[in-house]
């Protein structure tokens, strides 16, 4: 089966990731382009006048002069959860501290209680429309973490929800075991015992046997898991094939980025408080920094210093961090606009951060996130002529058509 996209106003030729440093802003563009996909992969692209003749059954898609780029990859999400926390969001606006919110019954444990009470079917039903909206905003691949069950059974339930969702809707989903997200109330004062519980061989073997996750993640922060606990958790997970990710240096500077680098983590995420030593360590290790500007907006907190990371030659990725507590933003294009305004990234850098570099952050840079022959034909067609226009029109849905593996999986009805 062939797909031809014609009348492309501008084709953004994102190279395979990771794309590092200042090269993030030097992406080639082809004006007046066409593209051919064959058997789910990009087979050719270039000026429309040079388009080859296509034999066989072919779907022809008119881009109507819009910009075409690789499908967006949301490489850090908590998109499976139950319940909402708008009450505590208002409390934050009114000036209540996180400790005051916890004492009033809010915080992460509100979501934990809701997830524990939910059945697998209910978790799937809650996430399904969320993923549908993410798809409509151009996301063709997304990572989803556990982390709101905080018992072995409930964490596995979350990953099983991700697995079920992966086969019933078009977005390609990647599971991450984030059982080390917070210390559950039952283990207050005993975080080491909780690490023991979530790294039992039988638990990790279940994840491997059922293929529930590819990565293990940990929230390494004061009040959560310290460096030795995080290392012990990630080392145990690595023995069962789960590659490391780290929530690092978000609230305090405690060396979590350096730990991520030393353990060969695929990504280190947040990084609002990273220091020069952490930056150097990430660069040496080839660990992808994932920035989450939506979280900074939602919490009215200091954003990560993207320009510093880019100047250091790192391949910056950007994601939504969609979650019920600190960033209920589902739209990756909106977060790309925030990357421009809050992180001072150019629109092209933001596009690379949400395609090629996001693919690198989930170990898929060899087949996703690039406009390259042989790569998956995961593509989005915009209703605007260039990526700058999409980021400039903050919050307006600009994605008109979404293609996954060469098939049109969503088309906006105007």
Image (cartoon, rainbow, N blue to C red):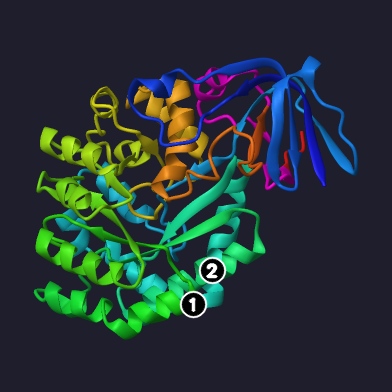
Q: Residue 163 carries which label?
A: 2
* Residue interval drawn in magenta: 383-410
Query: Secondary structure under badge 2?
Result: helix
On the question of residue 323 being in view, the answer is: yes
- Identified at 29% across, 71% down, the residue is 239
User: What percent of the width, then of the height, locates residue 48?
Assistant: 77, 18
Position of residue 23 relative to residue 319, above or below, is above
Position of residue 75 relative to residue 99, above or below, is above
Q: Nearer the viewer, residue 223 or 39?
A: 39
Label 1 Cα neighbours within 10 Å, binned few <14 / some 14-19 / many ≥20:
few
Query: How far is disc 2 from disc 1 in space, using C-alphas?
Result: 9 Å
Q: Which of 305 and 200 is in front in this view?
A: 200
- Identified at 49% across, 29% down, the residue is 351
- Identified at 29% across, 62% down, the residue is 108
- Which residue, as the protein is rendered here, is positioned at the far right? 56
- Which residue, as the protein is rendered here, is positioned at the far bottom? 202
Q: Quadrant of residue 183?
A: bottom left
Disc number lying in front (2 or 1): 1
- Identified at 24% across, 65% down, the residue is 234
Please say if the residues under marks 2 and 1 sit with CB atoms less than 8 Å apart.
yes
Taking 142 as reference, is 192 left or right? left
Q: Is residue 118 magenta?
A: no
Taking 258 as reference, is 401 left or right? right
Taking 360 as reference, is 198 left or right? left
Q: Nearer the viewer, residue 191 or 17?
A: 17
Q: Does the magenta stretch include residue 392?
A: yes
Name the residue tied to disc 1. 210
Position of residue 228 relative to residue 386, above or below, is below
User: What percent of the width, then of the height, locates residue 220?
Assistant: 18, 56
User: What percent of the width, then of the height, locates residue 229?
Assistant: 14, 66
Position of residue 89 relative to residue 25, above or below, is below
């Amino acid at each position: 089966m062939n797909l031809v996209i014609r009348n492309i106003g501008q084709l953004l030729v994102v190279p395979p990731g990771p794309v590092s440093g200042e090269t993030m802003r030097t992406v080639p563009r082809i004006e007046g382009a066409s593209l051919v996909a064959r058997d789910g992969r990009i087979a050719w692209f270039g000026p429309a006048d040079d388009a080859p003749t296509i034999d066989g059954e072919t779907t022809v898609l008119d881009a109507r002069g819009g910009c075409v780029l690789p499908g967006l990859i949301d490489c850090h999400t908590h998109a499976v959860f139950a319940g909402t926390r708008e009450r505590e969001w208002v409390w934050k606006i009114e000036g209540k501290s996180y400790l005051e919110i916890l004492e009033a019954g809010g915080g992460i444990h509100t979501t934990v209680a809701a997830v524990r009470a939910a059945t697998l079917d209910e978790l799937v039903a809650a996430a399904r429309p969320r993923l549908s909206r993410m798809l409509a905003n151009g996301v063709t691949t997304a990572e989803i973490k556990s982390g709101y069950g905080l018992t072995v059974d409930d964490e596995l339930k979350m990953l099983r929800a991700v697995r079920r969702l992966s086969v019933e809707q078009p977005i390609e989903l990647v599971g991450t075991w984030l059982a080390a997200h917070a210390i559950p109330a039952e283990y207050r004062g005993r975080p080491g015992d909780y690490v023991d519980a979530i790294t039992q061989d039988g638990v990790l073997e279940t994840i491997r046997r059922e293929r529930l996750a590819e990565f293990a993640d940990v929230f390494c922060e004061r009040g959560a898991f310290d460096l030795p606990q995080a290392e012990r958790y990630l080392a145990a997970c690595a023995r069962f094939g789960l590659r490391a990710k780290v929530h690092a240096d978000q609230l305090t500077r405690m060396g979590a980025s350096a730990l991520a680098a030393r353990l060969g983590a695929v990504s280190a995420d947040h990084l609002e408080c990273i220091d020069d030593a952490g930056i150097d360590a990430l660069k040496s290790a080839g660990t992808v920094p994932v920035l989450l500007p939506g979280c900074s907006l939602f919490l009215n907190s200091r954003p990560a210093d993207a320009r510093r990371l880019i100047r250091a030659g790192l391949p910056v990725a950007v994601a939504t961090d969609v979650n019920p507590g600190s960033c209920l933003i589902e739209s990756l294009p909106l977060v790309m606009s925030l990357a421009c305004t809050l992180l001072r990234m150019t629109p092209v850098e933001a596009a690379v951060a949400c395609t090629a570099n996001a693919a690198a952050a989930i170990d898929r840079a060899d087949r996703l996130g690039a406009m390259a022959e042989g790569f998956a034909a995961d593509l989005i067609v915009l209703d605007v002529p260039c990526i700058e226009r999409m980021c400039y029109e903050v919050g307006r849905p600009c994605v008109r058509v979404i293609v996954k593996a060469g098939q049109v999986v969503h088309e906006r009805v105007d």
